[in-house]
Image (cartoon, helix red, strand yellow):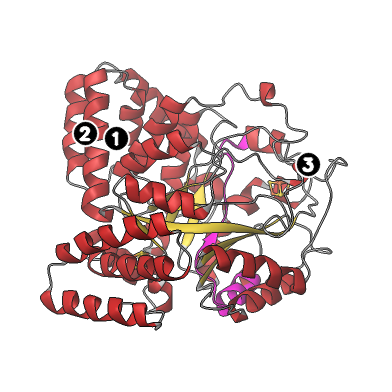
Amino acid sequence: MYNSKSPKAEEFISHEEILDTLAYAEAQKDNLALQKEILETARKAKGLTYREAAVLLYTENAEILEELYSIAREIKEKIYGNRIVMFAPLYLSNYCVNTCRYCPYHHGNCNIARKQLSQEDIVREVIALQDMGHKRLALETGEDPVNCPIEYVLESIKTIYSIHHKNGAIRRVNVNIAATTVENYRRLKEAGIGTYILFQETYHKENYEYLHPKGPKSNYAYHTEAMDRAMEGGIDDVGIGVLFGLSDYHYDLVGLLLHAKHLEDRFGVGPHTVSVPRIRPADDVDLTEYPNAITDAVFHKLVALLRVAVPYAGIIVSTRESEQSRAEALALGVSQISGASRTSVGGYVEEEEENSAQFETNDTRTLDEVVGWLLELGYLPSFCTACYREGRTGDRFMQLAKSGQIGNVCGPNAIMTLKEYLEDYASPDTAQKGEKLIEKEVEKIQNEKVKELVRAHLDELHEGARDFRF
Ligand code: SF4
Ligand code: SF4
């Protein structure tokens, strides 16, 4: 029985409700009147229900799709402007007791070198990341209570926050580790993490169980209810996502939206971010086993639908996507991207060994190249980490995001953090493009007082001061 407020996975992600939704939506495939009505609802930027989003997912009408993309672009512009938040993943350990069939870190893969960063290694990796200009990290580990216990993760977070190399600093550490207990989530919260991220991989229970045959992650309910425990542990910014291509994407999109609704209905706070990775080639992973792998066209349709269905949530794409695919996704609604990522343990210091990465990256450009590229496309790359540091998390953040007021702080913060990047790390060419954009962006600030303050801070940043924020 479907119940969005239930704490039980099988009730808030009800298989019957998803099947019923998909059957209903598919039957509306040619109902253009209904699709147009849903587009009008989407245009208000207040979100869509999972049923409404599913109806648009089934449409193949070119005109409706064009309209959907144009509304997604409008909402993106209205809520996020041209800002794109930058981050990098940091792989701490690839020891893993799980057996996820699609991941080369699975327990049975003997081809891969198993590594765990020592605290000294972490210092070196973080300095390398700071020297590129990164301020925001996403920590990644496999699941292994012996080789990678929670104490190790907590110590690593402390180490990362303590490193200040030249003008560098990591100001926000998001954490992507296996589902754990309320007590461990509380400890992560106390360690000062930003967002807790956990991908569901797929919401389809039967497929989930096939894809995760052994290990703690094989427990569908425990994994699916992780965000509830995280919220109970006091983490109010959570990031959800599926690995598109594992199951039918229609099913997983509805599952994702049911999960977002559940968090909102039960805790009053929807997901802070939604990630949209899709299955990629990797060592010991045979892509022919994944007939559900999605095309670029479907991927971009999913991004646009997520943008209109959950306008308040940040949408993240990684370097799994190519430069071209990322450009398209950025226009349709993506608000955060990683840059210069290494997906192996220790990869920022050592040359990446081909067989130790979690997945192949498609976009292999340097951070400076990615920043320069964003500037050329008219985007404002942002290294902002202000909200969590100002206590704007959970429902406080959501209220600002939903009312659109968050943009009043995001804009100035993006300008000032980009300026820091240009002063400390950019190539002359990127610096020149960036300074030009900053001039334009400052002019756009409507509040005269804020504009004056930003101008003053830009001068101070040029003189060597750092870390201003609203
Ligand atoms: Fe381990 Fe995560 Fe890979 Fe699964 S997806 S094998 S839990 S690292
Ligand atoms: Fe993100 Fe807050 Fe910074 Fe805006 S002000 S970019 S929401 S951290």
Residue 347 x, y percent position in the rendering: 70, 55
Q: Residue furthest front?
A: 428
Q: Residue at label 3?
A: 355
User: Quadrant location of residue 214?
Assistant: top right
Residue type at tag 2? Ile
Image height of 35 relative to 419, above or below: above
Tell whether 189 sits left or right of 466: right
Depth check: 228 or 94 in front?
94
Helix, strand or loop at label 1? It is helix
Q: Residue at label 2?
A: 38
User: Quadrant location of residue 203?
Assistant: top right
Cβ atoms at labels 2 and 1 below 8 Å apart? yes
Foreground disc of the pair 3, 1: 3
Helix, strand or loop at label 3? It is helix
The residue lying at 78 percent from left, 70 percent from top is 118
Residue type at tag 3? Asn
Q: Which residues are magenta?
A: 183-205
The residue lying at 62 percent from left, 34 percent from top is 280
Crowdedness of circle 1 by 10 Å Cα count: few (<14), some, many (20+)? many
Residue 120 x, y percent position in the rendering: 76, 74
Q: Residue at label 1?
A: 52
Q: Is residue 203 magenta?
A: yes
Mark 2–mark 1 Cα distance, whole angstroms, equals: 6 Å
Q: Residue furthest top?
A: 30
Depth check: 333 or 199 in front?
333
Residue 265 x, y percent position in the rendering: 37, 57
The residue lying at 66 percent from left, 49 percent from top is 343
Residue type at tag 1? Glu
